[in-house]
């Protein structure tokens, strides 16, 4: 339970996404209500999907507990997964809002 | 059947979010924007995942994956990095569209109300 393999990189991924937005991309996404509403919805759906992937009774993904904090909530979801998921989805959203929409006919 | 579990889970995520495409400008209808948003993040998470697997931080239960592998990981894990952000984009796009509609309704009501 030293967390070096998962906890630390998960925290770093969140910091990298924040720095990317605040110092480089500056899209203003974090000030948009639509973003936070979306995050609540994504979070709500992450629980059943991730819960299924990580349930200890029949896990699809098996974690080496030496590399996690050992905190699993809700159900058996390692809390690190929420950082991982947030960085993944927010990273793509940041690039999405930074770009102009594709042309209507494309 | 069990070995399709991870793949079916991802398929379910794609299906359940598919109707969101019909709100606003959609995501699938903007393939180049989607590709440019997805690719850099996909590469970063693919590298992270490959390192984590190599260092035995996590692994996949052979009972619940198809057995089809891409370099360093099961096919399902690579697809995860496409499917989950796609669900996020569709959600965001739909939420924006719904907020836009609500704003339109509110403005219309405001226009109609006596000054």
Image: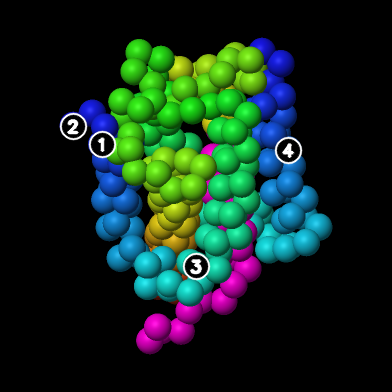
- Name the residue: 71% across, 16% down: A2
Magenta highlight: main SS? helix
Which of the pair A5/B96 is nearer the observer?
A: A5
Q: Which mark is residue B35?
A: 3
Is B26 left, or right, of A28 in this rendering? left
Quadrant of residue B30 within the rendered picture: bottom left
Q: CA distance from mark 4 to mark 1?
A: 32 Å
- Name the residue: 64% across, 20% down: A67
Q: Which mark is residue B4?
A: 1
Q: CA distance from mark 3 to mark 1?
A: 27 Å
Image position, residue B77 (x, y; %): 44, 42
Where B63 falls versus A35 (above or below)?
A: above
Report which residue position mark 4 lands on. Answer: A12
Image position, residue A102 (x, y; %): 48, 79
Q: Which mark is residue B1?
A: 2
Q: Which residues make up the magenta segment?
A: A82-106
Residue ranking furthest to the left: B1
The reply to whether callout 1 and callout 2 are in contact (CB within 8 Å) is yes
Where B80 falls versus B25 (above or below)?
A: above
């Amino acid at each position: 339970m030293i967390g070096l393999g998962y906890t630390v990189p998960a925290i770093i991924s969140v910091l990298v996404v924040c720095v990317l937005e605040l110092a480089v991309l500056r899209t203003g996404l974090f000030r948009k209500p639509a973003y936070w509403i979306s995050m609540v919805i994504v979070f709500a759906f992450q629980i059943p999907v991730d819960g299924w992937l990580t349930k200890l009774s029949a896990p699809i993904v098996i974690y080496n507990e030496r590399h996690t904090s050992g905190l699993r909530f809700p159900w058996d979801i390692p809390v690190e997964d929420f950082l991982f998921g947030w960085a993944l989805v927010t990273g793509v959203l940041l690039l999405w809002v930074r770009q102009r929409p594709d042309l209507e006919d494309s | 059947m069990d070995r399709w579990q991870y793949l079916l889970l991802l398929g379910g995520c794609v299906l359940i979010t598919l109707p969101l495409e019909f709100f606003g400008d959609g995501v699938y209808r903007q393939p180049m924007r989607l590709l440019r948003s997805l690719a850099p993040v996909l590469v970063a998470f693919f590298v992270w995942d490959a390192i984590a697997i190599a260092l035995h931080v996590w692994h996949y239960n052979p009972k619940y994956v198809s057995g089809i592998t891409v370099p360093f990981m099961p096919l399902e894990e690579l697809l995860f990095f496409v499917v989950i952000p796609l669900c996020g984009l569709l959600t965001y796009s739909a939420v924006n569209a719904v907020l836009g509609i609500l704003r339109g309704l509110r403005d219309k009501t405001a226009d109609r109300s006596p000054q």
